Amino acid sequence: MREMSTRARARTSLWAVVGLALSVGVGFGGNAGCGMRGSSGAFMTPQEIAAHGTMVVPGDVPRAYRASIDSLRALGYEIAVERPEQGLVISGRQPLGSVARVSGGSYSATGSSVTYYRQFTIQVEAQPGGNVRIVATPAVFEGASDISANEVWALEGPAGERAKWSELFQNIRRLM
């Protein structure tokens, strides 16, 4: 059996990462440690969260808080933290997929895999006029490491973060 060259292993690993990124809506930029410089990943900014990850709706905090928890559960998330007195909900980490990594030379190779996860932190706050503000801040983890501050976000498209926020907020509105 012919051994796979280092270049072929790297190319196979690269396509595995690209496939994962496309399937979960997260791009892996050069700062994410995946070695894919020039990919289409973006940074998650406070401006992005304010524009697309925040909604204000009529209602009260307890109802919006409960709807936020129920919406996360409907999307397949477990709830890791519930602090109703603070209006805080943190989802469990939902697995996105794993990527195999292979390294080595011509005569030996080692392999490992890393699993990627996503998580939401939701803050529910009362606003003037009988309204409630809901802020959903996403996070992405590479194993146990939070890589959310890196250039790893796909914002546009059907699997992008804006679509995920839209689905979350539609569920919350429906449940309120």
Image (cartoon, rainbow, N blue to C red):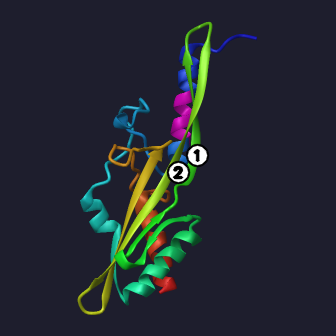
Residue at 35% x, 75% y: name it. 86
Of residues 49 and 162, the one drawn nearer to the viewer in this rendering: 49
Q: Which of marks 2 and 1 is in front?
A: 1
Compare marks 2 and 1 and give the one earlier in the sequence: 2
Identity of the residue furthest to the right in this view: 1
For the residues marked 2 and 1, what is the alpha-carbon distance in whole angstroms? Answer: 8 Å
What secondary structure is the stretch in magenta mostly built from?
A: helix
Identity of the residue furthest to the bottom in this view: 129
Of residues 29 and 70, the one drawn nearer to the viewer in this rendering: 70
Mark 2 burial class by Cα count in 10 Å: few <14, some 14-19, many 20+ = some
Dot 2 and dot 1 residues touching (CB under 8 Å): yes
**Relative to residue 53, is residue 25 drawn left or right?**
right
Residue at 59% x, 8% y: name it. 106
Residue at 40% x, 63% y: name it. 162
Three-letter amino acid code at disc 2?
A: Val
Residue 36 percent location from the top left of the image: 41, 32
Of residues 127 and 154, the one drawn nearer to the viewer in this rendering: 127
Residue 152 percent location from the top left of the image: 39, 45
The residue where tag 2 is placed is 24
Residue 13 percent location from the top left of the image: 55, 28
- Residue 8 drawn above or below residue 38: above
Chain part drawn in magenta: 13-19
Q: Which mark is residue 97?
A: 1
Of residues 137 and 83, the one drawn nearer to the viewer in this rendering: 83
Q: Tell me where residue 73 sits by quadrant.
A: bottom right
Mark 1 burial class by Cα count in 10 Å: few <14, some 14-19, many 20+ = some
Three-letter amino acid code at disc 1?
A: Gly
